[in-house]
């Protein structure tokens, strides 16, 4: 029994709901964050863990090729969109 909804549709729905998927290419690894911010790997990890504990980021996974050509899954972090403030009338 097929519902007519593809895997990509499900993944898009999860992404729209801010649910991390197994292969979250929009996320950054600790090393990518360190390179982007000009930090040591240790300091980058510290900053990402701080964001995680404050609810500003979520832990997810992304896939990348290693130097041997093998596909590896890495822990990564993605920023959480701040909730829109409700206007009171």
Image (cartoon, rainbow, N blue to C red):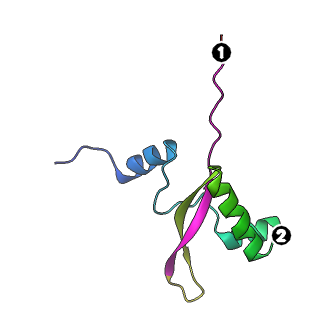
The answer to whether 34 is drawn above or below residue 16 in the figure is: below
* Residue 28 percent location from the top left of the image: 64, 64
Viewer-side residue, 73 vs 84: 84
Snapshot quadrant of residue 58? bottom right
The residue wearing badge 2 is 38
Q: Was residue 84 drawn as part of the magenta stretch in this picture? A: yes
Q: Which residues are magenta?
A: 71-88
Quarter containing the C terminus: top right
Write the residue at 73% across / 63% down: 47
Q: Viewed as shown, does residue 5 lie left or right of 66?
A: left
The residue wearing badge 1 is 88
Report helix, strand or loop for mark 2: loop
Q: Was residue 82 drawn as part of the magenta stretch in this picture? A: yes
**Camera-side mark, 1 or 2:** 1
Q: Residue furthest left?
A: 1
* Residue 73 percent location from the top left of the image: 50, 73
Write the residue at 62% across / 35% down: 83
Q: Viewed as shown, does residue 20 lie left or right of 55?
A: left
């Amino acid at each position: 029994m097929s519902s007519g909804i593809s895997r990509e549709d499900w993944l898009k729905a999860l992404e729209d709901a801010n649910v991390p998927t197994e292969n979250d290419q929009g996320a950054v690894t600790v090393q990518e964050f360190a390179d982007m911010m000009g930090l040591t790997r240790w300091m980058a990890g510290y900053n990402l863990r701080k964001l995680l504990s404050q609810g500003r980021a979520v832990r997810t996974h992304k896939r990348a090729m290693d130097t041997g050509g093998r596909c590896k899954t890495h822990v990564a972090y993605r920023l959480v969109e701040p909730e829109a403030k409700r206007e009171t009338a």
